Image: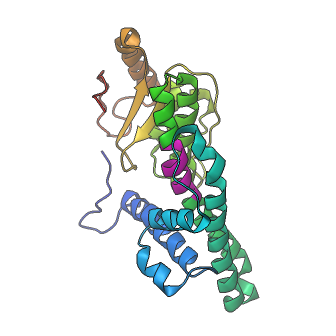
């Protein structure tokens, strides 16, 4: 259960991280709006990064695509907005002076990474995952969902150890988990599957994970997943409630 709401003593680490992920998206939009190429009328139309993506799509004359066709045009939009963010931060760096170079470069990288995670997830990964699922391309689906979970762990940094680890275990990747002994989030790379696909989901800093398997192996897999989790995170070690169950996806 996530502790995102803070408490009587103020913000928790989870609530600060939760708000930071949202705040970085807003600051990335601000940097884009103040970069070269937008004007005051444009800014009034854009309240979110999604608005910025739609505006750049119109400006570049790119039609909205779906399925695999989205890959052919997405890089142009992504590069335009990333360049705008960099342009704003470069200008701000000049205004602050030479002593701010290192921190400015790092902050620019963070803002660009936050935008690109949002863009990849909403404009590429989600529609491509839908295409893969609809066409029963399960290897593709697994790879796409791996990338989505990796973005949550490494860029959003909104996962706790348990929710970072569980999808890796489901996918046969638990040996790739490096833990959180440093200040950076755990890193991992793709390896062959067990479940067709698996990921954390929800707002992060606690919450849930899912794994996709064949119906006739689901209950066996759930027991295996639970046993593996209990071995890695013994019950009572974190104080977090755990529940594993089998369900089928609804229509839609």
Q: Position of residue 244 (x, y in %)?
A: 32, 25
Magenta segment includes 176: no
- Location of residue 34 by image quarter: bottom right
Q: In the rendered structure, does residue 122 fall within the stretch colored magenta?
A: yes
Q: Residue 89, percent across and down?
A: 65, 78
- 76, above or below 65, in the image: below
Residue pushed farthest right? 98
Residue 218 in the image, given as x and y percentages of width and height: 37, 15
Residue at position x 46%, y 70% in the image: 26
Write down the quadrant of residue 112 in the picture. bottom right
Extreme residue toward the top, this view: 216
Q: Nearer the viewer, residue 228 or 219?
A: 219
Which span of residues is magenta-colored? Answer: 116-126
Image side of residue 139 versus residue 212, left or right? right
Q: Is residue 131 visible?
A: yes
Q: Nearer the viewer, residue 228 or 111?
A: 111
The picture places residue 212, in percent across and down from the top left corner, at 43, 24
- Judge whether 137 appears above or below 152 on screen: above
Q: Nearer the viewer, residue 103 or 23?
A: 23
Q: Residue at x 67, y 69 (%)?
A: 83
Q: Can I make out residue 172 in this image?
A: no
- Seen at 46% across and 52% down, the residue is 158
Q: Up-down: is 155 above or below 207?
A: below
Q: Is residue 250 left or right of residue 62?
A: left
Is most of the magenta stretch helix, strand or loop?
helix
Quadrant where the N terminus sits is top left
Which image quadrant: the C terminus? top left
Q: How is the image coloured?
A: rainbow
Is 78 displayed left or right of 21 in the figure?
Answer: right
């Amino acid at each position: 259960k996530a502790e995102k709401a803070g408490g009587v003593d103020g913000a928790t680490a989870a609530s600060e991280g939760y708000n930071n992920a949202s705040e970085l998206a807003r600051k990335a939009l601000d940097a884009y709006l103040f970069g070269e190429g937008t004007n005051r009328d444009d800014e009034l139309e854009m309240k979110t990064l999604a608005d910025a993506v739609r505006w750049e799509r119109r400006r570049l004359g790119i039609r909205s695509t779906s399925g695999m066709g989205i890959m052919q045009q997405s890089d142009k939009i992504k590069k335009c907005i990333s360049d705008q963010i960099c342009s704003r931060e470069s200008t701000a760096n000049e205004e602050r002076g030479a002593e701010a170079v290192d921190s400015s470069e790092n902050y620019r990288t963070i803002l660009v990474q936050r935008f690109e995670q949002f863009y990849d997830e909403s404009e590429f990964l989600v529609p491509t995952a839908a295409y893969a699922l609809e066409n029963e391309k399960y290897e593709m689906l697994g790879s796409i969902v791996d990338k989505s979970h990796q973005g949550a762990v490494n860029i959003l940094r909104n996962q706790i150890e348990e929710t970072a680890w569980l999808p890796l275990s489901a996918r046969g990747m638990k040996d790739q988990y490096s833990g959180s002994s440093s200040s950076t989030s755990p890193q991992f790379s793709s390896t062959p599957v067990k479940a067709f696909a698996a990921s954390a989901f929800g707002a992060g800093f606690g919450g849930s994970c899912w794994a996709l398997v064949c119906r006739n192996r689901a209950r066996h897999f759930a027991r295996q997943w639970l046993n593996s989790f209990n071995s890695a995170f013994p019950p009572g070690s974190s104080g977090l409630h755990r529940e594993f169950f089998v369900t089928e996806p609804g229509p839609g």
